[in-house]
Amino acid sequence: MIYELSNPLTNTLITHLRDKNTQAQQFRHTIAELTKQLTYEALKDFPLIQKNIATWHGNKKFETIKEEDIVVVTVLRAGLPMLDSVMELLPNCVAGFLAMKRDENTHKSVLYYDRLPKCKNKTILLVDPMVATGGSMCDAIELIKSKGVSKIISLNIIGSPEGLKKLSSKHPDVDIYIAQIDEKLDINKYIIPGLGDAGDRSYNTQ
Ligand code: URA
């Protein structure tokens, strides 16, 4: 299932991201705000448990998400502001890191670092701002699935129709929450209109 956020606030924030005059700090902040919107949608039907809480007038049980059962996995480095944002909402969730490099000739992703925690029976929130060809997301999902995960939810900011088609046809069991779907990929596999390179925009590199 692909769920595209579409509301005036989301679209306004995306427009800020597209503006090349938006500086890195505001760019990361805006990515983080959009991630909160995506997380809210993605966890709408998440099961709640009862937790014993010491309140101001005694111990009482209240409902909560079991945060420890959620693993947020980021693909370095563009996904880092998204990871921070999820961990602000769910401070007790667990983080995992994957590093993939895009080969600029083949446009394929190459995994060079894997620091995933125990994933068995956990829900994975896989965060990556851009779904361009979908190649790195598919590779990340295959790796995560090999660790015995039952549920993966993908949180993304902008995607191409081509990349999303690939992702959803290879992994129909993965729910995709995305802020906006763009027109197409260019010949260099960048998203049009997109926002440029999300990692470079976030960290003042090029
Ligand atoms: N990665 C990005 O950061 N931007 C694109 O347009 C494509 C891949």
Image (cartoon, grey):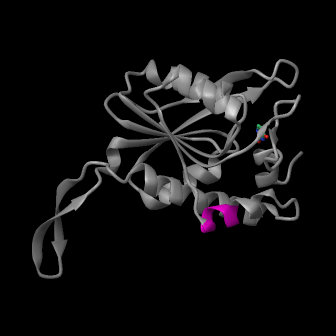
In front: 184, or 55?
Answer: 184
In the image: residue 26, left or right of residue 129 = right
Does the magenta-highlighted stretch encompass residue 12?
A: yes
Give me the residue at 18% from left, 67% from top: 53
The secondary structure making up most of the magenta span is: helix
Rendered image quadrant of residue 85:
bottom right
For image coordinates 76% across by 41% down, the residue present is 183
- The span shown in magenta is 8-13
Q: Which of 53/122 is in front?
A: 122
On screen, 183 above or below 134?
below
- Residue 140 appears at what percent x and percent y? 57, 27
**Percent position of residue 75, x then y:** 63, 37
Residue 20, image x and y in percent?
A: 87, 59
- Residue 100 within the magenta-colored segment of the rendering: no
Residue 3, compared with residue 137, is above or below; it is: below
Relative image position of residue 50 (x, y in whole percent):
16, 56
The quadrant of the rendered image in which ligand 1 is seen is top right
